[in-house]
Amino acid sequence: MSQLYYRRTDNSSYRDRIPLRIVRAESELSGLERNYLGAVEKGDYASVKQALEEAEIYFRININCIDPLGRTALLIAIENENLEIIELLLTYNVYVGDALLHAIRKEVVGAVELLLNHKKPSGEKQVPPILLDKQFSDFTPDITPIILAAHTNNYEIIKLLVQKGVSVPQPHEVRCNCMECVSSSDVDSLRHSRSRLNIYKALASPSLIALSSEDPFLTAFQLSWELQELSKVENEFMSEYEELSQQCKQFAKDLLDQTRSSRELELILNYRDDINPLLDENTNDLARLKLAIKYRQKEFVAQPNCQQLLASRWYDEFPGWRRRHWAGKFLTCVFIGLLFPLFSLCYLVSPTSRYGHFIRKPFIKFICHTTSYLTFLFLLLLASQHIVSTDPNRQGPTPTVVEWMILPWVLGFIWTEIKQMWDGGFQDYIHDWWNLMDFVMNSLYLATISLKIVAYVKYSGFRARNEWQMWHPTLVAEAVFAIANIFSSLRLISLFTANSHLGPLQISLGRMLLDILKFLFIYCLVLLAFANGLNQLYFYYETDEGLKGCKGIRCETQNNAFSTLFETLQSLFWSVFGLISLYVTNVEADHQFTEFVGATMFGTYNVISLVVLLNMLIAMMNNSYQHIADHADIEWKFARTKLWMSYFEEGGTLPSPFNIIPSPKSIWYFICWIRKHIFKITRPKKTETFGTIGRRAAINVRINHQYQEVLRNLVKRYVAAMIRDAKTEEGLTEENFKELKQDISSFRYEVLGMMKGKRAAPSSTSTSTSSSTSPSTSQDGLARKDICDFGLYSVSEEMGEADLEELDCDGEKEEQGGARERTCTEKEENEERGEALEPEDIGLWNQGT
């Protein structure tokens, strides 16, 4: 009975188990091949060499055999960074395959150099089919050595490959419709996208850019912008492309960090690559900095060296300005601002005079323009207070004195925008949000002036204002003028960028406005959905206007809140602010079900709009503010630089309204234009001599040579700093301990090999003969780096027999657990042949006779 019980228990336990077996079995290695790969793993140079020699004679092992992890002997040696065994294997022409790629991935510079210098034999042996199948390779077909080296960002390996003349394929645009892109995308779209990503990841490598680019700054700018645009198209790899774009920006910033003098910094920031050496002059206009702003290189622009140079130019006329007391700064700005009309008149009369040059300074120009705009806002304030007013019942009133004073400022603003659009181009003009705001503001002022002219011409009589039509030109002009005043006051926020405390707030405000625009898309959809439903429900319950005396939600007693679609939209919008009462859902008829449905819909809308959408907007705005706060220094300095650069530009010196007064220079330019385009009178151009052209070309060539010399120095410093930082951050890792263990194992086998060679050598043989016949010291033509400096007998002389035996026994204790009963000679033989095989069966070791 007990036997039956136990038998039943055993059977039930097997039913609850899942039998396991190897489904994808691979070919097993022979004992000889296992020992061969084991010797490579341990770094036993003599054993590996003996195995390779016997493999050529007896063909008992395949020197290209693969272990269960898919590694050949060459890959094992590369992983262990054993350069001697790598060189030995290459001497016997083992199959290389992807060994170069593995060496690059492991960043073994010595192995890469050996593989690059290795010449494949003309009649290479047959390669195992598994190595020819790309599905079993660790690398995709598009991964070339230079691409993989750029991914690892190893400067030494990239330099070795570039010296060999390698190249990187040019990536095509995402929307490219060439035959190659279309066919590649049709065959395998994933591989096509991945291939483009791998190429861009290689091109974005800082080491590759620093080593192969003639102008690393320009390459980093353009590549960063291209990657940023690419991230917007290929949304699947957006994070990868954005990371690469940020990497290029950081590289440009780190390279600029290496500047050590103002001369180097000015050469970089003033360099132009788009000039003709014979026709154009290289001016001191910060062309490279303008390019950085165009490509939105915020890290580069906000770099301290760059900001220091900009500040020195901004406060050119006031050395030591930042060290002054704030009260002194304020009084200085007020004094210059009050004298801006005098400075403007001096510039109009004599632009080249002392005061003419003074007002052209960026900081002075900024103070004058700011004071002029503050004067304009003061006039708007006077106009809104109606200090000088006309009869309110006059339908076409004449402009007041204050309005006549405002008119020159408006004309000056319009002229400024026209010149800015003409000089910078339409594309650059519309990409600045402040320019769009100026355009709207000036359009509103022009509309106001036009409507006032129409009202003055068409309506000249008096009539009570309450009797005017709704769309009367004067009424519309007053409304448009009020809106323009709001834009004019808000335009002053752009000047906050110059202040370190208000600047980040102004940037956060701009980012929040973008969040509000995104939020309005969702909110408008919800608003329209509920407005449509409520209007459909309450359309039949519209009350007569005569019964209530007032119709709509703006009445003292709100009514007809949902009678029309427009009224419904207004009611739902104002309900967000709690200005709509719940009784607007009631109807005069006794239709309680309709009231219940209407109240439920109204309440649901308030829950969605207030609880969900409004809190989502708050979270979005908080996120935007936090993003700006985390990068406040970079964001503010970039915005401030854009403001400063607008005043560094030539032209636009005079503020409004003095800019509309023709200067003698402007009159002369206008006369020349009339003679050229109206009367077709052209003056012959002054012919330049070869000397003038040669001198200009020599200057440009010298500047270009100095720029390249500075770049060379910056790249050297950058590479040195990059290697130094890498060593500092690396520290001790598990990989370091593995390398140390491999070096100790290799050294142990070398010492054991030398000991065995000494014992096997005949006593009558000389030292030179013994050295030539010993396996560990044979002259095989290989560069044995670690043991070539000390010979066989020098080790024996330094260490006595007892020391050698102790070293040998200690090594055996490490491998076998310290079996003290065996002799050292027996343990050597057991280690060399393994537990299950005899020396004559292996055939790898010659004991010497």
Image (cartoon, helix red, strand yellow):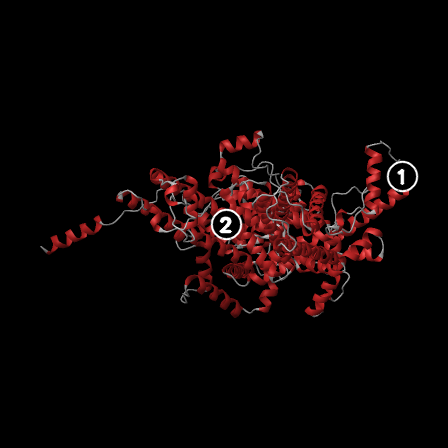
The x, y position of residue 164, in whole percent, is: 66, 44
The residue lying toward the viewer, choosing from 8 and 775, is 8
* Residue 782 at least partly seen: no
Q: Quadrant of the N terminus?
A: bottom left
The residue lying toward the viewer, choosing from 386 and 841, is 386
Q: Residues within 10 Å of mark 2 (few under 14, many from 20)?
A: some
Name the residue type under label 1: Lys
363 left or right of 664?
Answer: left
- Indicate whether 342 appears above or below 129: below
* Residue 397 at least partly seen: yes
Q: Mark 2 points at which residue?
A: 516
Residue positioned most to the top: 179
Quarter of the view holding residue 379 = bottom right
Q: Mark 1 points at which residue?
A: 686
The x, y position of residue 780, in whole percent, is: 61, 50
The x, y position of residue 413, in whole percent, is: 69, 47
